[in-house]
Structure formats: C-alpha cells, structure tokens
Image (spheres, helix red, strand yellow):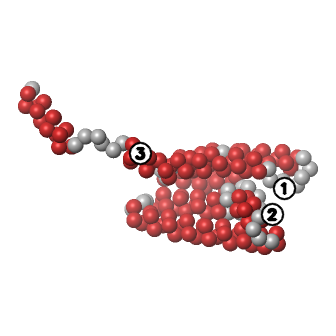
Amino acid sequence: MHFNGALEPLLRWMVRGVVAPKSAQLVTATLLAVIWLSASWLLIRRSRRAGTPIAATVAQLFAVLLVCLPTLHPWYLAPLALLLPLTRTWALAVWTAFAPVYWLHGLGISANVPWAELGWVTALAHAPAALVLLFEVLAPHVRATATAPAFDDGALGHAVQQTETAG
C-alpha cells in the first residue's frame, strides 16, 4: 500500500470503482506515470516558450514529481522548500508549510493500526495547496478581464498634453 500521496489516494479510489481490485494498483501507478510524464513535458515546453529560468523550471518539475509520487513523506518536501525562492508561486509555499500536518497520521498508528492512512489528514496536507494552485492558474485570466482599461490611451495622452500647456 502506498502512503500520503497527493494524487494516488484519489486515483486509487476512482480506479477501484472501475477495475478489478488485483489490477487497481497497476492501473493507478500507470495513470500516475502518464500524468507525471505529460505534465513534465507540458511544463518544459511552456518554460522554454516563456523563457523561464532553469532553476524555476527545475523546482516546478520537482513539484510535479512529488504530486505524482504514490508515497510522499513530509521530508520529501525539504528540497522543494530550498527551491521556493526560485519560484513565483504561493502554492508550493503553502504545500511545504502544511508538511507538519503529517504527524497526525500517528493518531491512526497509535490506535494499533499499523501504517494507517487517515484520509482527512492526507486531504488536509494537500488540499490547501491545490486550492491555491487552482487560484493561481485561474487568476491571470480573471485579472486580465477585470482590469481591462476603460479609456483610450490617445484620449489620456491628449488630456495630459492639455494640462501641461495650460499650466
């Protein structure tokens, strides 16, 4: 069984409703690999087109890898915390800040259930960062439509020119 993954528990739950239990783990791992490879390819392609610095691209690729790992322990986020100054995202900062939440899995282990994954703890560790990431992805589109200039630059230039000549 895998433990604490960001996407793995959700994919495992969805796959178990569709395929036989014996093949669920293989299908889940295959889906995670496909998501990781396709997201990495898209990220590299977008970074090259936008001219993103290589250090920021490496941090983003590492984050994509962590999201797709079936097992994610909190100390896996330590290198990501070191790379945070190179990125321009709050989602990664929120994700690393929520790493201490993982100690709550000890509640399941202390209840004599070895390696028990508490779904609410895993969700609490990953959901806030996912929401911030969703906002960051959608926010540029919202800001671009909400802050469109309501005036003509030519008219503004003409008004500035009139005040300069009047004074």
Look at 53% across and 59% down and name the residue there. Answer: 60
Q: Mark 1 points at which residue?
A: 115
Quadrant showing the N terminus: bottom right
Please tell me whether mark 3 or mark 1 is closer to you in this view.
3
Using the image, determine if residue 58 lies above or below residue 78.
below
Using the image, determine if residue 128 lies above or below residue 17.
above
Between residue 57 and residue 64, name the one nearer to us.
64
What is the secondary structure assignment of the residue under circle 3? helix
What is the secondary structure assignment of the residue under circle 1? loop
The crowd level at tag 2 (other Cα within 10 Å; few <14, some 14-19, many 20+) is few
Between residue 121 and residue 139, name the one nearer to us.
139
Quadrant showing the C terminus: top left
* Residue 93 shown left or right of residue 14 in the figure: left
Residue sitting farthest toward the right: 112
Q: Which amino acid does label 1 sit on?
A: Trp
Look at 11% across and 33% down and name the residue there. Answer: 162
Q: Residue 144: give x, y in percent of width and height.
A: 38, 48
Q: Name the residue under label 3.
A: 143
Specify which label sits upstream in the sequence, 3 or 1.
1
Q: Residue 23: give x, y in percent of width and height.
A: 78, 73
The number of numbered badges drawn on the structure is 3
Q: Which amino acid does label 3 sit on?
A: Arg
